[in-house]
Amino acid sequence: MSTARQRVIAVEGRSGALAPVCARLDHAGYRCTRAAADVALRRLDGNEADLFLVDGSDAAAGWEGLVSEVHRRRAEGVFVPVIVFTPPGDVEARIHCLRLGADECIPIGTAEEETLARIEALLRIKSIQDRMERSRQELQRLSTVDGLTGLSSRRHLQARCRE
């Protein structure tokens, strides 16, 4: 998987805890952009993000709404993983983040290589999810349209009439 096209959005609070992570990702070939939670949500709407990194140490940053919304959108077939960075040793914060819908919680200060490996793992999962979604859409298209004529299938037309 090419990292050059992987778009990572870092939602950072006042602590600046994600700056070293973004620098490491930039060095590794990812495109890491810092944004406020509301801007990150717009990036989700525009399909402009492959992964969200969130500084969970700053409750005022509005990150909880972002995590909940990203989780809610999964029902619509939109999968963008979320990693929340929490204060070291704060088990309650990690539990809270996971229950909100985060895919991973990493204590701030975790070794860079471990953090990078966790990011790579979630991006692999996203790649698989995206391929599955494209396959699902293609199967849906094939089940409703005749491949030879390009006309809607009989079953599809009957289903549309019942609607």
Image (spheres, helix red, strand yellow):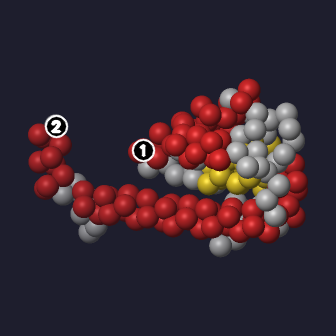
- Quadrant location of the N terminus? bottom right
Q: What residue type is labelled 2?
A: Glu
Please state which of the two labelled residues, at mark 2 or mark 1, is closer to the viewer: 1
Q: Residue 57 carries which label?
A: none
Q: Position of residue 81 (x, y in %)?
A: 59, 53
- Quadrant location of the C terminus? top left
Measure how far apart labels 2 and 1 are at the Cα level.
21 Å
Q: In this view, does 127 lie above or below 162?
A: below
Q: Residue 163 carries which label?
A: 2
Residue 83 falls left or right of residue 140: right
Q: Which residue is drawn at 75% across and 67% down?
A: 114
Q: Quadrant of residue 134?
A: bottom left
Kindly tell me whether residue 131 is visible in this rendering.
Answer: yes
Q: Are marks 2 and 1 in contact (CB under 8 Å)?
A: no
Q: Quadrant of residue 6?
A: bottom right
Seen from the viewer's position, the closer of residues 112 and 37 is 112
- Mark 1 lies on residue: 76
Mark with earlier residue (2, 1) = 1
Disc 2 element: loop
Q: What residue type is labelled 1?
A: Glu
Q: Residue at x 82, y 48 (%)?
A: 18
Question: Furthest-bottom residue in view?
Answer: 1
The count of marks equals 2
Q: Position of residue 40 (x, y in %)?
A: 68, 38
Kindly tell me whether residue 52 is visible in this rendering.
Answer: no
Q: Is residue 76 above or below residue 3?
A: above
Q: Residue at x 71, y 68 (%)?
A: 117
Q: Position of residue 144 (x, y in %)?
A: 24, 57
Residue 144 falls left or right of residue 40: left
